[in-house]
Image: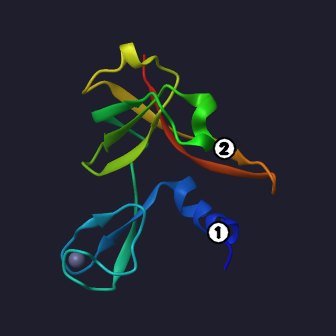
Amino acid sequence: MSTSARYWREIPQRYRLEASKCKGCGAVWFPPRLVCAECGKREFEPLKLADKGKVRTFTVIRVAPSEFCDEAPYAVGIVELDGGVPIQCQIVDCSPEELKIGMPVRIEFRKVKQEGEAGILCYGYKAVPVR
Ligand SMILES: [Zn+2]
């Protein structure tokens, strides 16, 4: 299966911010997994994540991989969603100097990049500061 086909298959889960909660040990995985890395069970129930949270930690990328070079500097961080589930994502609409650990953010679904040759738009979730 090609990369883009796999990407499109994942979009509904990304769009809904849907995680999987292990029926064995209760661990929550996002993106969802097929096998629990904590206990090895394969039974999960879907868990809708909150779309708000706060910044737990972040890094400012000043020298970006070539595909993102026109976006640098940009921030990526770990956002702890309400309910305690951490997700990694880009933090946008905010200068690096404004970023603070603990600042409230909401999660939005936005275009991440456009793949040149195929013209495929890739979407993903990003954190936007709540002011
Ligand atoms: Zn488990």
User: Disc 2 versus disc 1: distance between alpha carbons?
Assistant: 14 Å
The answer to whether residue 97 is above or below residue 49 is above
Which residue carries the number 2 mark? 113
First in sequence: mark 2 vs mark 1? 1
Tell me how the rendering is colored. rainbow
> Residue drawn 43% across and 24% down?
129
Q: 10 Å neighbourhood of mark 1: few (<14), some, or many (≥20)? A: few
> Residue drawn 67% across and 51% down?
122
> Residue drawn 45% across and 27% down?
62
- If the image is split into quadrants, where does the N terminus sit? bottom right
Which residue carries the number 1 mark? 3
Q: Is residue 60 left or right of residue 66?
A: left
Q: How many marks?
A: 2
Q: Position of residue 7 (x, y in %)?
A: 63, 64
- Between 26 and 96, the one nearer to me in the picture: 96
Q: Position of residue 26 (x, y in %)?
A: 21, 70
Residue 50, numbered label? none
- Between 87 and 130, the one nearer to me in the picture: 87
Q: Secondary structure at mark 1?
A: helix
Q: Position of residue 90 (x, y in %)?
A: 46, 38
Q: 10 Å neighbourhood of mark 2: few (<14), some, or many (≥20)? A: some
The answer to whether residue 44 is above or below residue 90 is below
Identify the image quadrant of residue 58: top left
Residue type at numbered disc 2: Lys
The answer to whether residue 101 is above or below residue 51 is above
- Between 128 and 114, the one nearer to me in the picture: 114
Residue type at numbered disc 1: Thr
